[in-house]
Image (cartoon, rainbow, N blue to C red):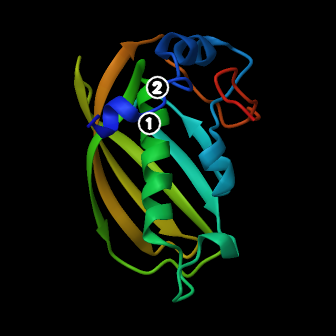
Amino acid sequence: MASFAEEKDNSKKVDVDTIAQDLLSKDLRTVDPFAKILNMEVLWAGPEEAEGIMYVSPQVLNPYGTVHGGCLVALADSVAGHNMAAAGKLCVTQGSTVNFLNPANCKEVRCRSRIQKLGRRNSVVAVEAWDEQGTLLITALFTFSTMKEIPPHIIAPDETFSRLSFMEE
């Protein structure tokens, strides 16, 4: 019997070099289809910090009428990942610890990340998310594994989103 990994269809596997090439394009800003579904966007990303936002819609609410915890984690992970790209690292999330402090009963969630340790192979990023009243919703710590070193992919606050070539419709 084949293992799950052996049965997996690798025909849609994304090439790391293709992703890195897209990140190097000066005319493009990173957005992924998953983030689009959750109404998330990265507002800016620098080599030390990054900030993003999720515009809350009924699709991201849990049965209690608050934002689903998984959506809050997705926002935090996305912002932290863009922070790493702005620091010159194309990474994947290796692990995370998330503390849910308050329910998110709001129209938007803001999230800010700050790199705590930038390593050659592994890095650590701290994240906080809060609502429009300033109530702290989550704190998180993400560990990233570097796939490839890239030139820093800075996202300026006034840029607009574009679709990258490695993203399929």
Q: Provide the secondary structure element on which disc 2 rests.
A: helix
Query: Viewed as shown, does residue 86 lie left or right of 99?
Result: right
CA gap, disc 1 to disc 2? 6 Å
Q: Which residue is drawn at the image coordinates 60% and 78% (left, top)?
A: 106
Q: Is residue 62 visible?
A: yes
What's under tag 1, amino acid-wise? Gly
Query: Viewed as shown, does residue 28 lie left or right of 10?
Result: right
Q: Return the mark for residue 155.
A: none
Image x and y of residue 168, in percent = 70, 30
Q: Provide the secondary structure element on which disc 1 rests.
A: helix
What's under tag 2, amino acid-wise? Ala
Foreground of the two, 28 or 15: 15
In the rendered image of this protein, does residue 53 appear above or below residue 27?
Answer: below
Residue of label 2:
85
Residue of label 1:
81
For the C terminus, the image quarter is top right
Alpha-carbon neighbours of circle 1 within 10 Å: few (<14), some, or many (≥20)?
many
